[in-house]
Each structure stands twice: as structure tokens, then as C-alpha cells.
Amino acid sequence: MNIGEAAGRSGLPAKTIRYYEDIGLIKPLRDANGYRAFRESEVQKLAFLGRARALGFTIEDCRSLLQLWEKSDRESADVKRIAEEHLTTIEEKIAELTTMHASLTRLVAACAGDDRPDCPILLDLAAEEARPEPVTDDVR
């Protein structure tokens, strides 16, 4: 099947499929004309990767999970370790977001939001005292 059909069946955009091929997660066959020819096994891998990415696993985690999925002699402890590490990361992010939410809620409540120039939100942002590191977008 072609990339459009594989995209439809796997639920992933063609651009994502091309990216996964570029980084070696999948290796579809090529027709004589050079077009990708996806087998059912690649579509299953793509669906697997889509579900793993939807759960927030990194590309490298996905690579490891895919290798384990394809290994019949795998140990589930290896899979569980990857999932537990990811769960810990999620829990840390939730804690950071909870702290951010509480701080921002406090600041918003303290701001009159009227036509006066004084604003506790800006004062807090400009404060020189040490603040916790902001949460950054982790490209995964």
C-alpha cells in the first residue's frame, strides 16, 4: 500500500511517517518507481508508534519499545522499566505544573485588572529573588 493508505490505516500523517522512516523507526519497501510500499507489518508498527507517542514516550523510548515488541524473547521487566521511568517524568511535570498553577492563580487574584498601572503580576515577574526554574518544552 502507498503512504496515503498507510497514513489512513495507522492514523498518522504522511509527514510523520516520512519522519519515522528518516530516523529509522520503519523501513518500508520501495517499488520499482521508487514509491514507498507499506506492508501490513509497517502499518502495525506505525499504529504502535502513534499510540506510544500519544502517551508521551520519547522517540528513543519508542525505538526501545518497538525493538522489545518485535523480540519474542523479551522480558516484560524491560518494558515495565521504560514505562515506569516515563511515568516518573510525567509525575514530575504534573508537580511542576501544579506549582505553576498555584503561583499564577495567586498572581491573577492579586491583580486588580483595572486602568491603574500597578500590577502584581509584572512586579513578580521582574523580582530579582531566585525563582524555580520554569518548565520548558521538552522536544521529544
Image: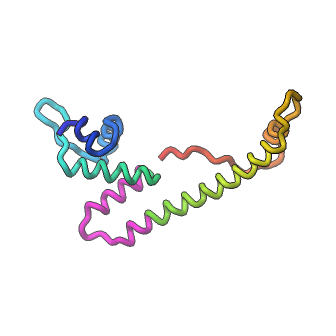
Q: Is residue 114 above or below residue 120?
A: above
Q: Is residue 67 magenta?
A: yes
Residue 84 placement (x, y as % from top left): 48, 66
Quarter assignment of residue 108: top right
Give the left or right position of residue 58, taking residue 21 as reference. Answer: right
Q: Is residue 9 magenta?
A: no
Which residue is rendered at x = 43% and y = 50% of the image? 54
Residue 61 placement (x, y as % from top left): 41, 56
In this picture the colour scheme is rainbow
Q: Nearer the viewer, residue 107 or 90?
A: 107
> Which residues are the magenta region?
59-82
Residue 81 placement (x, y as % from top left): 44, 68
Quarter assignment of residue 55: bottom left
Residue 28 placement (x, y as % from top left): 21, 43
All told, the count of numbered labels is 0
The quarter of the picture where the N terminus appears is top left
